[in-house]
Image: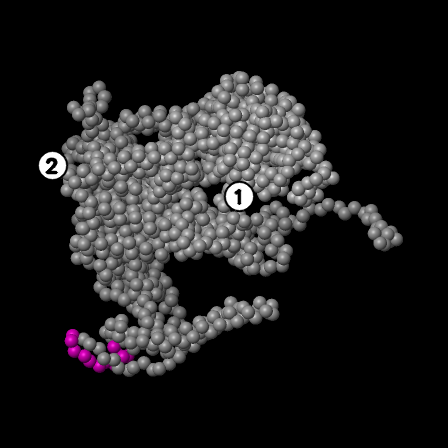
Amino acid sequence: MSSNSQPTTIYQQDVPRRHAPITATGVLGWMRANLFRTWFDSILTVVATLFLISAIIGFIEWTVGAANWYSVLRNLSNLMVGSLQASPEALVRVNLMTLLLAFGIGVSLRAWSRVGLRGWLWTAGVSALFVVIPALTSTLPLPPSMVTSGSIAVVSGSVSETPISTFTFIGRAGETIRLAVADEAGQDDQNLASISAFGDRAADALINAARAQVAAQTRLAEIERLLSDESLAAGQRALLTSERDNLTEDVEVISERYALNSADVAVRVLAADGETVLVEGLLSPGGEALTYTLPEDGWYILDHAVQAEEANTLLQLQGVYPVLERSVTRTRLDADGNPMVSRTGQTQTESFIQHVRLTDDFTTEAAVPRIDGEDVTRYLFVNNQYRGIRDLTDYLVLHFGPFFERTGRAVLPSVGLVALGYLLMQLLDRVLPPVPPAPKLSRRVAFWLWFAMPFVVYFIIAGTDARNWGGLFLTFLLTAVGIVLSFPIGVLLALGRRADDLPVVKYFCILVIEFVRGVPLITVLFLASLALPLVNPALSEVPGAVRAMVAITIFSAAYLAENVRGGLQSIPPGQVEAAKALGMNPVQVTLRITLPQALRAVIPALVGQCISLFKDTSLVAIVGLADLTRIADIIVAQAEYIGLRRETYLFVAALYFIFSFAMAYVSRKIELSGSGAARQVQL
Amino acid sequence: MALFRDERFIKIFLQLVFVAVFFTGLILLVQSVASALAANNLTPTFAFLDERAGFAIAGAETYYSPDDSYWRAYVVGLENTLRVIVVGLPVTTILGIIVGIMLLSSNFLVRSIAQFVVEVLRNTPLLVQLFAFYYIVILALPPVQNSIEIPEGNPLLVLNNRGIVFPELIMTPRFALFAVIALVGVAIGAAFWSESGKIIERTGRVIPRVRGTLAIVIGVGILGYVVASLPPPPTTITVVRDGGTMEVAVSESLEENILTPEERASVARTPLTILYPQRAGLRYQNGNPYTATYIALTVSLIIYTAAFVAEIVRAGIMAVDRGQIEASRALGLSFERTLSLVILPQALRVIIPPLGNQYLNLAKNSSLAIAIAFADLFQVSTTIINQRNQTVSVFAMVMVTYLIISLSIAYVMNWINGRFELVTRDTVIKRPLWRRLGDWVNYTVLRRPHVER
Amino acid sequence: MKTTNAEAIIVCNKVNKWYGDFHVLRDVSVQIAQKEVVVVIGPSGSGKSTFIRCINRLEEHQEGDIIVDGIPLGNDVRNIAAIRSEIGMVFQQFNLFPHLTVLQNITLAPMQVRRQSRAEAERKAMELLERVRIPEQANKYPGQLSGGQQQRVAIARALAMEPKIMLFDEPTSALDPEMIKEVLEVMKDLARSGMTMICVTHEMGFAQEVGDRVLFFDQGRIVEEGTPETFFDLSAEHHERTRAFLDQIL
């Protein structure tokens, strides 16, 4: 303003645009910003990376090498439906319900969302896993079974095991078994210690002893190395020397101690009657293997005797696997295959013992073979767990493949129904396109489908015995019933709590809500199971699951009321005033104006409550209902699955996680899509 | 019928109908329960509370025996519940804040690992976590005779499958002198605090107020500790054994470990002395023992709840407008000042209401103790019910107790929340004394801020 | 003034109201004739909004009488309903129902309260939308409209109940300046068509153009009333409060 005498400076030369420095963009830039921002960050990154790597490696090593997933694999249907698995009819009903829900999910996906090409590819890819993995792993060879034949009791630590000469196993018609001497394993202790296979007790003791021996040798070598150091302090030297002396006293070569694989073994395979000899032969170290094809399904007996006074020979068997005993309850069927009904109208059930082969689903109901009036020892799972660190092949064929095969039976049809529902709705929307402002037809179908769902599901499951409900099915049922039934109660309580001009109603609602919210769910559950029969003795006849539903409904209603109240509070008072000014009465105002808006606003909170409730239903395990958590607890208490808590709990936790995480994911999607609370703000 | 068209009358009438229906239902219910109970000779009464309980409570052997009354057993259960809550709340808060800060870390790996752990903990049931922690971690610890002692010899921590033992800190007769000197230190510190405050306000000079006060208090405290430790300890001690008294040399007796904790305290040189846990057969003597079930429950609750608290802390800090931070940096405030003067006060306003709900959840979830047979309020109560069939009376007691616990926590949290609320035109600054009761109802029940669980 | 008592459609006699202990309306007495357009002005907090909200019972007055079209307003729910269906109201914040489309907003009350058929209600609604000049927005949600459009929908919604009286509670205060005009145009049309209107507004131009009478509120009472010509004439005689107010705004 003041000095316009100075001429303006004109910069004619253009400054060319350049790329940002490489350290500020791309991968390097990201790493700098997210991993190595400061020296402290860099240290954290290194520590976290090391932690992550060790955790992941540790987990994979455990899963593949050591974890025993049989408690899960053998109990999949138990974990899913509990005691309902015993009744074929109930299973049909549960499956029907699952497929219906899957269909509903497919319809809703189309109605409120879109599945793009990527979504389809993902679905197809994941579904293919359930087909491809079992197909691939079934081509892998099963691990051998190690069986000790001999006369010397094997001692390992405080354990002493005498080899058993006769045991029984089950097999399918047409399966080939192969019997041979385990030549390699018997050569030296190093080989013996590194066996990974099934094994009987004596073989297990042998392996353990060999491992101890190998460990002792390693330690001895270490001590010798330390002692060779001249500068060693006298005290240290004395300690090491005494340790060496102790070790050398103990050390004995296991393969020599038991004259391992020094003698031939005469083997016979007998039929289930214990008399008919199907095949017999002499197995010698380094000699030919004996193979035999089983003629029919069922029990066989293997008989083996070492041909020397003092010798143990380790046999390696293919096609002979541990057998699991389990007690099964199921509906009795008459000659026509219809369920038998007692005079009181209850379906009759029967319990009997089944034997299942550990490595696959092969099952027999025939009685265990007897010789001289005594059961022949079974090649039992309890005594015959997998020995050693499993290699990847064995993990794939024993656990990974079967898991995908079995879960695939449930997952694949469900995915199919989801796809079917989606495609049908796509077709519908294309054939009958909506006229605005009417919503898409698929949306209406979805709405009415979910509206009808509780009733349909009720009809489907009403035919099952509530006393047998269990597993994930019960967990879902309790959650769904809790949410659906508590919804109207919760809304009423919320409206009541907001009724400022009806103080009596208001304070009553406050009292109910705060009382229920102030006490733990478990007390409400106990009250329902202990105190309900006091109201009327007839109520003690009500199944526990139904009583739990009552408790959960009341509990959930109080929390739901608070959520809805939050939604009601978020509605500006002008809405009610406008509706009143239009002449609407209080009921119309509530039904047409406040509630619809409040419910939209609290959808995320309601899904959050679904998740809480889904997890909270685990508490029914404490009052003795067989939900997912309790089934896991029951499984690990059974003799054959003792020590498998980690695997079982991990699986159950993963199940809970998958479903509640999926619910949270959907909730986040709804929030983002703006069909919930966001609409008010966004539009 | 003009009356029935009167707004005021309709409201009163509706409420009368409601009350009538409600009380009729209630009376019918109570009558039917009462008659059913009377028919089974189970009329509710509290008289049984004075009778002998007859059951033992693990971990409470030193102050409770089966010969005590049911009431005493109930109180022991309540104490156990409170022990879980009192330890659980602060530790949960600290852990939750740490993890919450990790969730906000600029380091991708730290953030992702924290996120993964938090999601896993939030999306699996507490009961499954409790089972897993108790059976897989705690019960897998070695038995008592092979306890893990850290460090060995004089352990600060003993771990075995029955629980854990910490050393005991006991006061010796010298503690009185130390306490007097330390109190003088606190008094000087307080004086320094207020005086320096005045100087700062008057002159604006920079005085390291916090550090100065801490230095005075800690310095005088250490001085007191040293002074109290100066007099030499006695060389001999008179002990009473088997009715007779004898004089023994202190050094010898300590070596042979024949002194009771009280006697050891009396000959110790310092105002405080540590009693290390020592294994005696199948149990540990000295030290503070915690049963395996207590540890399992408390740790599970802390870890589970901390995951939720972490998420709340993260959301609370994220809720502070970026502009606030920029404004305070623009004013030249340091990062620490920005954090303590701008971010935290605003974040706390968002954090406290849901945090209070998590505290309530922790308190209520402590009732899961029954799943692993930890003798808390609820577990003891079910035992009593099983023995005496006094379902109604015991449940009434249990529910009222839990309600009192819940309402107390709600009251404290809402009071704290009130202190952090933004001052607006509606803020009532001073309330007359007579409205305090109304305030209480307000804080605990009526105006409880709505938050998602 | 063209009013006489015989034609009065709204009669307020010594209306008093308190919020807690705060005396918000003090002896407010006024009579409003059919087809009269009354503009209520006054400083904020003077009770003018409270006054018109009392007329359709969004607020309850504690003393005095309000008679609308011969129906006394009291605690009788039937009378309240009758009065509300004769009075349309337009709010400062529009208060459209965000979960319903524009068309649904307008047809809701005729269908729910007047029990009209959907077809009839929708035909009527489209007519009204034509009248407020936004028929093309019928299937949008309120959130998709501008403030001025929303306020015009609100007017259409109120008109759909075929009220005899319209209350406007600062209808242009929440609008951007360029939208005020479109709303005022609609209101002027309405006034010219012979609707009885009570408008609380700060739009002095509107008051002068279509107002029949101006009521000036201060501290809960009517301080002055008169025709726009005399009221806005600074040379005329005025109450000191009025003069202070007029000095501020003119």
> Percent position (x, y) of residue B188?
47, 74
What residue span does the magenta drawing correspond to? Answer: B242-253
How busy is the neighbourhood of tag 1: few (under 14 within 10 Å), some, or many (20 plus)?
A: some
Write down the chain letter for disc 2: A
- What is the secondary structure assignment of the residue under circle 1? strand
- Identify which residue is drawn at 30% across, 63% down: B288
> Percent position (x, y) of residue B95?
43, 55
Q: Is residue C103 above or below residue B362?
A: above
- Identify which residue is drawn at 35% across, 42% down: A511
Visible residue check, residue A360: no
Q: Which amino acid type is shown beneath numbered disc 2? A: Gly
Write down the chain letter for disc 1: C
Farthest residue, direction left: A372
Q: Nearer the viewer, mark 2 or mark 1?
A: 1
For disc 1, the marked residue is C23
> Percent position (x, y) of residue A264?
22, 44
Q: Is residue B296 above or below residue A140?
A: below
Visible residue check, residue B191: yes
Q: Is residue A113 left or right of residue B264?
A: right
Q: Are marks 2 and 1 on the same chain?
A: no
Query: In front: B365, or B307?
Result: B365
Q: Quarter of the image holding residue B291? A: bottom left
Quadrant (top left, top right, bottom left, bottom right) of the N terminus of chain B: top left
